[in-house]
Image: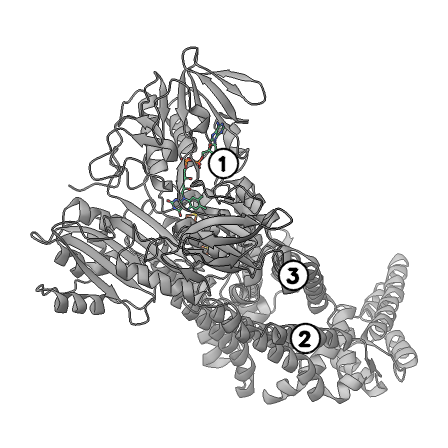
Amino acid sequence: MQEHIVIIGNGISGVTCARHIRKRSDSKITIISGETEHFFSRTALMYVYMGHMKFEHTKPYEDHFWEKNRIDLVHGFVEDISYGTKTLKIRSGEDVSYDKLVLAVGSKPNKFGWTGQDLPGVQGLYSYQDLELLEQNTHPYGTPENKQRVKRAVIVGGGLIGVELAEMLVTRNIKVTFLVRENKFWGNVLPKGEGELVKRHIIEHHIDLKLESELDVIHAGEDGKVSHIMTKSGERIDCELVGLTAGVSPNVEFLKGGDLALQRGIIINQYFETNQKDVYAIGDCAQFDEPVVGRRNMEQVWYTGRIMGETLAATLCGEKTKYNPGHWFNSAKFFDIEYQTYGWVFANNREGEKSFYWEHEKGKMCMHFVYEGSTGKFLGLNTFGIRMRHEVINDQLNHERSIDYVISHLADANFDPEFYTLHEPEIAAAFNSQTDYKVQLKKKSWKRILRLSK
Amino acid sequence: MKKIQLIAITLFAITMVAFVSSLFISGFQVSSETINSHLDSKGMKSEILKERLLNEVSGVEFSNSFSATGKIRSVFIESNAIHEANVAEHRSNKEWDKSNDERQNIAKGNYRDFAYDLMKPSGNGHVHENKGLWLFLTFGLASIASLIFILINLKVLGPAGIKNTGIYFENNTSKGWIAWVTFSFLVLFYIGLYFFPSVIINWTYIVDPVKDIFGGGGASQWFLYGLLYCTAMSIMGIRMIVKYRHNKYQIVRTISVVFFQVVFAFLLVEILPMFGLPGVDLKNAWPLDYDFLFDWNVTNLLANGHFGKFVFVWGISLSLVIIPVMVYFYGKRWYCSWVCGCGGLAETLGDPYRQHSDKTVKAWKFERYIIHFVLLFAVFMTIWTGYTSYQQVYHPDMDYNDKVTLLGISSDTIRSWYGFLIGSVFSGVIGTGFYPIFGNRVWCRFGCPLAAYMGLVQRFKSRFRITTNGGQCISCGNCSTYCEQGIDVRAYAQKGQNIVRSSCVGCGVCAAVCPRGVLKLENGPEFNRISPDNPIVLGNEAFTLNSDITD
Ligand SMILES: Cc1cc2nc3c(=O)[nH]c(=O)nc-3n(C[C@H](O)[C@H](O)[C@H](O)COP(=O)(O)OP(=O)(O)OC[C@H]3O[C@@H](n4cnc5c(N)ncnc54)[C@H](O)[C@@H]3O)c2cc1C
Ligand code: SF4
Ligand code: SF4
């Protein structure tokens, strides 16, 4: 009999896993997922709301892809799993049995027990249903001012999804107040310079950004819908919509009370194995019992979900493989400013780390390099408004290049479109004047970029 | 600000209404002199035609171009029908001489050009008497209104950046009724331009004052088209630059493509004849320029001294040497997005519709069949017409039938079918008319034989690629949505593979709209240009990447 691998969740991690299993083996694959029939890109939800795309465009594969690759899709929610008999129950009543089970069930928006957090007009932004709800809670694009359902929205929590929500709402002419607990934007991740840059840009987009303010209570009006909120400092803000974007947490509610080991997420080892035989977990919902050195025990981003899916597929097909992500990288966009990060740049330098920060005179581009003070070893880079070449930086991190090497080879790493003004001379000059290094810029070399020579 | 924009749109709509109604509010009165001299100059001998024209057309006040065209059409066709019937009768009586004589009476050509020639000198009425005023009311005001609208966007749309907000909500850009009206207008316009020029003759009056700058003589429908083309491209080019003002690639490329259109396809074509030289578009390359080896073009060039010969040699080297070499170094974008007029219109006037291209695998398959079919068709047609031109130049005394016949097929037949199907219907009516519904590069993607030719070079021997930035893709789909060539860019990017596709015109918009900085158009070594099929995407150290060939 063919082995039956069942995957719960058709997000990036579950789908990547399924695709790679199919590449490697002939097992029967079933993906069960409740949110949408087909895989779509969660990261693109904002573009659907803003009218850049239609929902169909967010689907990375055409609908015939699944049948062609013999990946069975079941649209439904799993309610219960019996690990002993290796069966699971779908809400519609059907039972499915598995030989191996992959939990790739993602996350849900955090709610911290605020009074009023479940009122109509209060919502997070994670799922397709959240997008539909947001359409209901707000007015259509182009609604004249006097007919707008929502005049002001309050967004709680200054992270990436919060900025996206702010950008979305602005396109419907909604005024946005953004409550951020920290004293700088995305304060637990971004260093001061970058935080300031993003803050300025958010304000440039007419967002009422309130740093160091926290939500206290959400109040309803006579119609039972949100009417205003109170901050901890006692300020009242009238609003018709509250967006809760204070992070996400693993979506493990339906797994509680069973035999599966859970903490915040599903506990796994480096092979994605849970405490139950033949049950694995990947993506947003997973929590490593022991994180890979230097990394967090929960990684809730697109890329790690994909890497976990790729890796687990090998194990499931008989080639037992450990989670071994390369150097950290991530990216995002704050309104018009793109952000990429490679390696580690923390909000505050760790012990022994040094920073070099360059900002363009117009204040919309910056680069922040972190290196080891004693050896000069390059550790990481934040870049805003300038694109960098992943392969090159990754290679520099792999080879433990020194900071002066990295600065002098900036031309290799630049990934901006052709004809863009290059700021490398300026960056190098700033570096030389701020440090004792005297770097000379090297010309861009395809040989180095393609790693044909050192 | 938004109010002013609303006023500008309204003004633009009014100018469009004025433009269309100008077709209906000017009459024609064809004089007997016009008729006589035209028949003489064309060597049309038919007495029936002449008499009927003098009786039924000359002196009659036609209230618009449709009724005038209609009348001339029926006279032309009926007169020919009588002569053809006579020919048949003489033949059946075996009166060969009579039949041959009568045959001379059948008017050559088609009634459309005939009507155009008779009507062009015969207009009267408001448009004809007030050309300058109408030029201002249509071209002038429309340009001003559009510019106001576009420049206000600098303020309304906020800081520079990708502003595709509302594209799938706005009526015009999401196939609403405005798109359908625009579609119908464009299709009808092209049908008029290619097949019924006499019907749109009033529009040529409107641009007569501009033609006067270039030596006068009355604007033809092609002059009208050229001017309209340049105006649309310039204004929508400014829109493009405003929209992408943060993106230098887009700015430089847009300036280039507008420059080549205005200077090479329009100004030079108009100015060269003022110096007695043939008005050729030097950037137009075979096989897009499908009539390059037609006998009239070849003989015309060879009859025009050094300049004509230069153009002839230039045309051949452009197609056979310059184009493949440039595609090798820069990809076909150097032509399609930087130089070409068709591409230029698509990138400017067509930009608001780029998202409508079909991204399915099915469409891709269809594309590969049809575009290569057109290329083959063009090559065959060129062999046949080239043969005819060769005989024309080297054996001018040969019988006409022998000159045009090769392997039993007439080059005249092939070329008229090509001209009709590909030259007019595909590239014009469908290629541009369909912008608002099927996207802006229908012709470039499915029909252009030059694109097919350059595509083969780009796919198999070129330094151009769109590099995918390691593992940074989030599969959002912006790139695929806005690829006017219907390339599913994301399908490559999310696998970490470079995009090397014959159809990519290098517009750079996928790279511009990507919110994660994943894509870069660049020219580099051919090594690993087409990414090896890596097991995984960069960022996963659990496996080795195939491309990691050193250390
Ligand atoms: C608005 C937004 C923007 C983002 N932008 C970025 C970004 O730019 N870059 C980045 O790296 N990351 C981004 N992320 C995070 C990224 O999207 C997630 O890390 C990633 O989608 C997680 O993938 P996953 O496969 O683990 O889970 P999910 O994508 O959450 O998929 C899990 C699926 O399982 C289904 N499911 C759950 N429980 C059950 C059940 N019991 N039965 C059946 N089905 C079930 C869920 O409905 C869901 O469809 C963003 C997230 C959001 C919400
Ligand atoms: S792939 Fe990119 S550059 Fe090529 S045609 Fe499509 S959008 Fe333009
Ligand atoms: S736009 Fe960029 S991030 Fe989005 S799918 Fe395309 S390459 Fe990937």
**Disc 1 chain ID:** A
Please, what is the three-letter code of the amino acid marked with disc 1?
Phe
Q: How many residues crowd around disc 3 within 10 Å: few (fewer than 14), some, or many (20 or more)?
A: many
Q: What element carries label 2?
A: helix
Instruction: Answer whether residue B229 is visible to the viewer in this image.
Output: yes
Q: Is residue B63 above or below residue A337?
A: below
Numbered circle sitting on residue B433: 3
User: Which sits earlier in the primary sequence, circle 3 or circle 2?
Assistant: 2
Q: Residue A254 carries which label?
A: none
- Can the viewer see residue B503 in this picture? no
Residue holding disc 1: A39
Q: Residue type at mark 2: give it.
A: Gln
Left or right: where does residue A396 sit relative to residue B84? left
Residue lying at 65% horizontally and 87% vertically, measured from the top left: B209
Query: Residue B272: x percent and y percent?
Result: 52, 83
Q: Which amino acid does label 3 sit on?
A: Gly
Q: Is mark 3 on a helix, strand or loop?
A: loop
Name the residue located 82 percent from the left edge and 72 percent from the top edge: B66
